[in-house]
Amino acid sequence: MHSFSRRSAVFGAACACVGAHGLFATAVAQTPQQWSPPANADRCPSRWGAADRRGSMNLMTPERAKRAATLIRTGEIVECGQTLNQQMPFFGTRRFDVHLKQTFMNPEANRRGSNEELVVAEIGQVGTQLDAFPHQTIGDEGYNCVNIPRIMSRNGFTEMGVDTVGTIFTRGILIDVAALKGVPTLPDTYEITPDDLQAALTRQNTRMEEGDAVIIHTGWGLLWGRENARFVASCPGLGVAAAEWILRQNPMLMGSDNWPVECSPSKTLPDASLPVHQLALAVYGVHLLENMKLDVLAQRGQHEFAFAVQPLKVRGGTGSTVAPSALF
């Protein structure tokens, strides 16, 4: 069974530059492999120490925010969040229901009427959503080998909840793999490789930097609300080698217009369930941003921008519905 050492990938001498495919280069490139996540000793403590609970959000510094602000030149804004409604794709028992409450007409002479709504939803895991670290585990442990049952409570997680993430304002880059392949949407279950990422970045004349919000355009978002059954059945996305290639360059987050960011089901690791989720959230401490609306950015060929998003302050939540924006 093939295993992976994040300690070797992150702290070793290997270069995390374009073309360095990491420890999966030979194990994943040719034939399907059995796979197990890294052992505790290989992934903990994190690069920020055993007590750390913020992971890649340690990269969210005032200097990085100021640098992102310099990318805003015209003041244009592209919204990258899907609209929440009852016609969205859903997984399993996830739901989003809106019930309008026409409450009352106030008795004063100005006749102020009031309307509200009751929303019943799995608010952390529907629509365009950001995953917090407790959302995914390796066995009973999460990021930095935190024992997840220990931090569970009736009202949410006592550590690493989505309320602790805070505002993300950093340089964002769009890696347009669909454009590289000359298609509006990548084929179902197409697994993006490190070579795809390198070729797309070269084609765009874009360079990845530490602390970036790295966003992958697959075109899968075009199915949103139109072909929901197909949208959730499978999807093109990052293969494990491609995800590791990005993660070793220390992004602030990884996002995509599909539902798991990664390819599902995995072609190179068919015995594994969403292995990139484990690598990003539990091993590297990098948040995932799913179900993004990227068609406008792709049509414009906008590959670099200031990126802004803030999760809802849901105490102890596993994630949050969000409405990210690209500014340039």
Image (cartoon, rainbow, N blue to C red):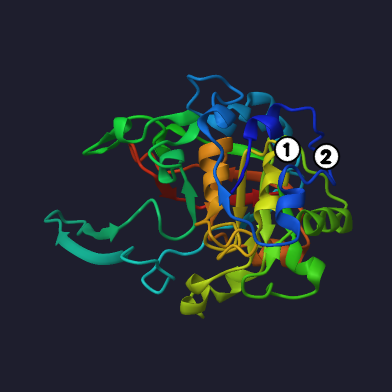
> Number of labelled discs?
2
Q: Badge 2: how crowded within 10 Å, few (<14), some, or many (20+)? A: some
Q: Tell me which corner region of the image, top left, top right, bottom left or bottom right, holds residue 10.
A: top right
> Is 52 displayed left or right of 325 in the figure?
left
Q: Badge 1: how crowded within 10 Å, few (<14), some, or many (20+)? A: some
> Which label sits on residue 249?
1
Q: Is label 1 in a helix, a strand or a loop?
A: loop
* Between discs 1 and 2, the one toward the N terminus: 2
* Front in this rendered view, residue 325 or 58: 58
**Whether residue 309 is visible:** no
Q: Are marks 1 and 2 in contact (CB under 8 Å)?
A: yes
Tell me which residue sits at (70%, 55%) in the image: 28
Q: Amino acid at mark 1?
A: Gln
> Is 322 displayed left or right of 124 in the figure?
right
Tell me which residue sits at (57%, 43%) in the image: 280
Q: Position of residue 222 (x, y in %)?
A: 60, 74
Q: Alpha carbon of mark 1 to alpha carbon of mark 2: how far?
A: 7 Å
- Residue most toward the front? 1
**Whether residue 126 is visible:** yes
> Is 40 displayed left or right of 315 in the figure?
right
* Front in this rendered view, residue 23 or 307: 23
> Is 190 displayed left or right of 125 in the figure?
right
Tell me which residue sits at (55%, 48%) in the image: 288
Q: Position of residue 297 (x, y in %)?
A: 70, 61
Q: Amino acid at mark 2?
A: Cys
Say if 268 sits above or below 19 in the image.
below
Query: What residue sits right under mark 2 in the picture?
Result: 17
Tell me which residue sits at (81%, 56%) in the image: 195
